[in-house]
Image: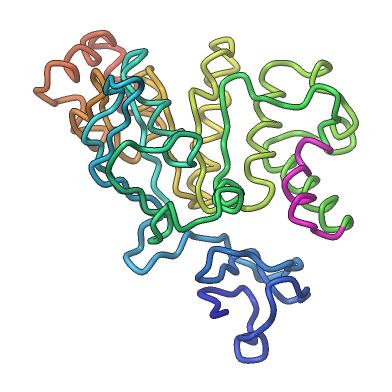
Amino acid sequence: MLWQESGCTDRKRHADRPENEDCSEWGRSLTCRDGFQPRYGRCPGWRVSRAAAPDGLAIELRSIEYHLDGRPIVSAITFKVAPGETLILLGRSGSGKTTTLKLINRLLEPTSGEILIEGRPQLEWDPIRLRRRIGYVIQDVGLFPHWTVEQNVGMVPRLESWPEARVQGRVREMLELVGLDFAKFAGRKPSELSGGQRQRVGVARALAADPPILLMDEPFGALDPVTRAELQREFRELAARLEKAIVFVTHDLREALLLGTRIGLFAEGWLAGIYEPEEFLHATDAEARAFVDSLGAGSVARVSHPG
């Protein structure tokens, strides 16, 4: 195996280290060209991982079509997402946004077209390994109700056979990252949490194995307005720090303008266009204008200059 990146300062000594061997110097940025991560340890000098493809892209969709019972659900979907970008998929209900997310992590198979993950055709990936390289956060969180917060967050690292001490350290780190005190929340069940706390746990679980790609399907949609605004602000800061490739589904233009690096507008299964946030506000496309008009002039000014 040839390693693309390493948080370890001694590349030569570890260049041919087997995938399942530990090293206390490995940082979390280590990823081999086959998409596997070794059983690495913490490193004081680690840097955040980026999905490293030869062309610099984490995700690429090429003319994707998906049909159900002969009926097209999405058509001619083409876009690219690089590490550090948040691409918002914006559109009305039923426009194909969630279907596109499910195509990225192979919960659905495209009828035609090609998807590349980290520069590698999606069909060449083992489906389980692929999904463990992709964090997935949904609106209803999907936490296991009979498991504690600690067990939920530590699920994927344990599936990856991390040493237990390392799992515990990672769970603590992830809970602190999303603003939850480990001592207070680790032993609680999901039923003992508020909606906002459950959503934070869902984000922590998605990030626990340090995937380079994060898919988010209206993660804040079911929350009250105050909690939603708080989590949106926190997520914007978190995304800037982690530099993941993120695809984020929403039907809320305010959220899209606040969180997105770019906005992909869906309409009736088609990708009508991809815009910079400020560019979207001045787009001439009829569907884009309908979203902008729904905000009102005062709201447009506020969300375009969030401060």
Q: Is residue 153 magenta?
A: yes
Task: Residue at 81% x, 16% y: name it.
Answer: 191
Q: Which residues are magenta?
A: 151-163
Task: Residue at 60% x, 64% y: name it.
Answer: 36
Q: Nearer the viewer, residue 107 or 157?
A: 107
Q: Position of residue 62 (x, y in %)?
A: 26, 47
Q: Is residue 92 magenta?
A: no
Q: In the shown orientation, is residue 170 left or right of residue 199?
A: right
Q: Nearer the viewer, residue 2 or 223?
A: 2
Task: Residue at 55% x, 42% y: name it.
Answer: 238
Q: Nearer the viewer, residue 68 or 153?
A: 68
Q: In the shown orientation, is residue 166 left or right of residue 270?
A: right
Q: In the shown orientation, is residue 220 left or right of residue 180?
A: left
For this orientation, the residue located farthest to the left is 284
For this orientation, the residue located farthest to the front is 69
For this orientation, the residue located farthest to the bottom is 12
The colour mode here is: rainbow
Q: Quadrant of the N terminus?
A: bottom right
Up-down: is 65 above or below 81? above
Q: Quadrant of the C terminus?
A: top left
